[in-house]
Image: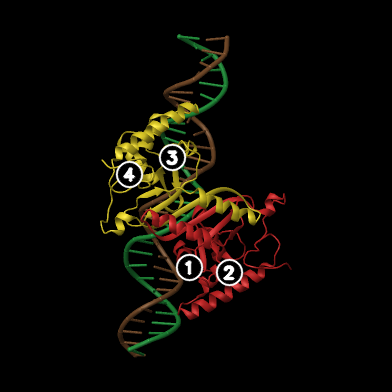
Chain colours: A yellow, B red, C brown, D green
Amino acid sequence: MSKNTSQDHTHHHNHNVCIDSALATAETLCVEQGQRLTKVRRRALELIWESHRPLGAYQLLAKLAEEGFNSAPPTVYRALDFLINAGLIHKVESMNAYLGCAHADKEHKGYFLICDDCHNVMEFDYQDIHAALIAKASKQGFELRAETIELTGLCSSCKDGSAGASA
Amino acid sequence: MSKNTSQDHTHHHNHNVCIDSALATAETLCVEQGQRLTKVRRRALELIWESHRPLGAYQLLAKLAEEGFNSAPPTVYRALDFLINAGLIHKVESMNAYLGCAHADKEHKGYFLICDDCHNVMEFDYQDIHAALIAKASKQGFELRAETIELTGLCSSCKDGSAGASA
DNA sequence: TTTTAGTTGTTATATCATAACAAAACATAC
DNA sequence: GTATGTTTTGTTATGATATAACAACTAAAA
């Protein structure tokens, strides 16, 4: 279908490409780092990648349970912890939900644009802003370690009227 | 004691000034807007302002309960909702906790520096970053409405060794 | 004083997350 | 291949955060 760059998370794209590439990256990274991408972890990652909308821990748990996985909370939180530590997903703090990371292979922070209408979330590139934040922090003598940058509003698709809920 | 500008949230300042000025601003704003700063709401605001560390809803609830206020969760969440809507406090999403706003009288977003060590949080000024974010968002056709900007790390006091927990 | 809107009380429950310990699976060395 | 240690998963329980729904009360307006 349409182009599918890392910035193209619109309503109209071949989402299988996102999933496949995320899974391929995950495999590679885990092998490189001697980490085990077990069944639950792998399936959790796939389920999170089923859309560009963040998935809640208990939504994920329900999906895993349907498929016969153990359905107690620790199962899903362990999988989430693993995936976050491996850099394969991000937690969206303002939603208490989890999102596949499209740049797992690059060291980066998650900066997000969150649509209030369709709830799709896309990561955006941020080097200049990141630099400005570091400068601002250090001007106050503050040593920056982590950043939570989550912007909400209306994505272009939703602004144009097509209230949506696609991948 | 020391100076007390809006940027001076170090360990050494006369915190009563912060509280008094926050309360005075709150009174004024509520009157202007025809809002009622009732007893619980007022006391909740004072308790949140007891430090520059964000306060959890249930911590606040406990303090209110000690003082004879009703001790069911809706009490505190209602007060928090009111204070947030009035612009008198912010929610720190990454901590699920609530912080007094030192600029309630100015239309603004909350951009925070959160110390991992002493847990003090200070708001910082952001006009240039805000502008950059708007530009970045609109380049993607995204219409920005709200921003969650929460930076964690080490504040200057804690970096200098004096692990701390003052107001 | 009646009405109305806003606020608070109360009970119940939804939602998000972790502690603690037992059992199983896996990797490695022998 | 079996003993050993490590990692992962199962299980039970509980902690932490937040809201729904409806009743009672209170202040302000008509």
- Report whether mark 1 lies on the same chain as mark 3: no
Quadrant including the C terminus of chain B: bottom right
Q: Nearer the viewer, mark 2 or mark 3?
A: 3
- Residue underneath mark 2: B46
The amino acid marked with disc number 4 is Ser
Judging by the rendered image, the residue that carries numbered circle 1 is B79
Q: Is residue A59 left or right of residue B49?
A: left
Q: Nearer the viewer, mark 1 or mark 3?
A: 3
* Image coordinates for residue B133, horizontal then vertical, percent: 46, 57
Sequence-wise, the earlier of marks 3 and 4 is: 4
The residue located at (38%, 31%) in the rendering is A24
How crowded pointer 4 is (Cα within 10 Å; few <14, some 14-19, many 20+) is rated as many
Chain designation of label 2: B
Q: Residues within 10 Å of mark 1 (few under 14, many from 20)?
A: many
Which quadrant does the N terminus of chain B fall into? Answer: bottom right
A90, A134: nearer the viewer? A134
- The chain ID associated with circle 1 is B
Tell me which corner region of the image, top left, top right, bottom left or bottom right, holds residue A4.
top left
Residue for badge 4: A51
